[in-house]
Amino acid sequence: MNVTFEMPYPPSVNSIYKKIRGKVSKKTGKRSDHALDDRVVKYRWDVIAAIGKGHATITTPVRVIIHAHAPDKRIRDLDNLVKCIFDSLTCASVWKDDSLVDDLRIVRKEPVPNGKIILTVETI
C-alpha cells in the first residue's frame, strides 16, 4: 500500500511543550509541569483536516519519505520535523503507532510560502 499526503509545515520539536504550573491532567489525573503547546494542538487538527477521511489505519511496518518545503530560507534542522508530524499522523489514524516506521528518509526541498510537507507512506 502506498499513500501520499500533503500537509502543513510543522512547528519545531523545540517548541512542542509549554511550561505550566503543575495542573492536573483531566485525562490521567496526574500533575504535570508541561503541556502541549497550542500550535502543536492546532497543527494536529490541521493535519487531520488535510488528510481527510476514507483511509485505512496501517498496522504493518512502513517506509516514510518526507519532502520538506520550509516556509522560508532560515537554517532548520530536518530532524526537528519528525516528532510533530508522526504524532499528528497517529492522531489522524494513518497508522496505529509511529513505532511502525522502520525506514525513514527526509529530503530538504525548496522553500514555498507558508511551507508544506509531502509525505509518502509505503508498507514494507
Image (cartoon, helix red, strand yellow):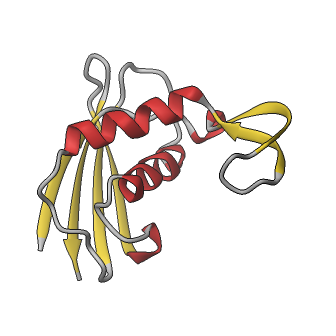
Q: Position of residue 61 (x, y in %)?
A: 32, 81
Q: Is residue 21 left or right of residue 26?
A: right
Q: Is residue 27 left or right of residue 8?
A: right
Q: Nearer the viewer, residue 25 or 71?
A: 25
Tag count in the figure?
0
Residue located at (12% from left, 68% from top): 2
Q: Is residue 29 left or right of residue 42?
A: right
Q: Position of residue 52 (x, y in %)?
A: 18, 45
Q: Is residue 28 left or right of residue 117?
A: right
Q: Nearer the viewer, residue 29 or 86?
A: 29
Q: Image quadrant for the N terminus?
A: bottom left
Q: Position of residue 36 (x, y in %)?
A: 63, 38
Residue located at (23% from left, 83% from top): 124
Q: Position of residue 82 (x, y in %)?
A: 47, 52
| Residue 103 in which image quadrant | bottom left
Query: Can see residue 68?
Result: no
Residue located at (37% from left, 36% from top): 45
Query: Can see residue 66?
Result: yes
